[in-house]
Amino acid sequence: MTETLERQVVAALKARSATLAAAESCTGGLVAKRLTDVPGASAVFLGGVVSYTNQVKNHVLGVPASLLEAYGAVSEPVARAMAMGVRVLTGSDLALSVTGVAGPDRDDRGHDVGTVYIALSKERETVVQLLHLSGDRAAIRAAAADGMFRLLLAHIR
């Protein structure tokens, strides 16, 4: 039986005695749900923020309003700032973030459904990836979460 991505993440974090936090927009807490479904995840997953609005991105995660205005919520700079913000907020070693368009319609800036930015923040580096996902809303959200787990695994193995 193949281990789920979230089980692999928890095991990899435990092996390195590292902690993780997440800032989620379009996934609406799916990453946190999947991680907390893994027994023992509390040893490594500190928690997260569902920052579905720009106000929460700004006031809770510290994403500068100027970034949100200049680039919009679905952008590389905002994904980067979200990951950095939740890492600082929680004191975690690593942090993931996601912002994108899950559908059914484009966003107010014309980004296509399935446009998703994911980020991983570490102490000295933040990595951002642009994903072009397809499917319905649920499929896009699930694929975005999978992408986040794969990004983390690629950088800590």
Image (cartoon, grey):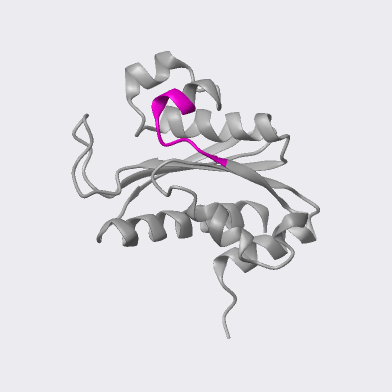
Q: Is residue 30 left or right of residue 12?
A: left
Q: Tell me which residue sits at (48%, 17%) in the image.
A: 64
| Rendered residue at 50%/52% (across/down) | 148
- Residue 65, compared with residue 94, is above or below; it is above
Answer above or below: position of 140 versus 90. below
Which corner quadrant holds the N terminus?
bottom right
Residue 112: give x, y in percent of width and height: 21, 43
Compared with residue 47, is residue 7 higher up or lower down, i.e. above or below? below
Q: Is residue 43 left or right of residue 114?
A: right
Query: Residue 3 vs residue 91: left or right?
Result: left
Does residue 50 show up magenta in the picture?
yes
In the image, the segment drawn in magenta is: 49-56
The residue drawn where x is 66% and y is 43% is 94
Q: Position of residue 154 (x, y in %)?
A: 58, 56
Q: Residue furthest bottom?
A: 1
Q: Would you say residue 115 sits in the magenta stretch?
A: no
The C terminus - image quarter: bottom right
Instruction: State the count of labels.
Output: 0
- Expressed as whole percent of the image width and height from the top left, the position of residue 122 reads 66, 38
Left of 132 or right of it: where is 112?
Answer: left
Image coordinates for residue 63, horizontal then vertical, percent: 50, 23
Quadrant of the rendered image containing residue 110: top left
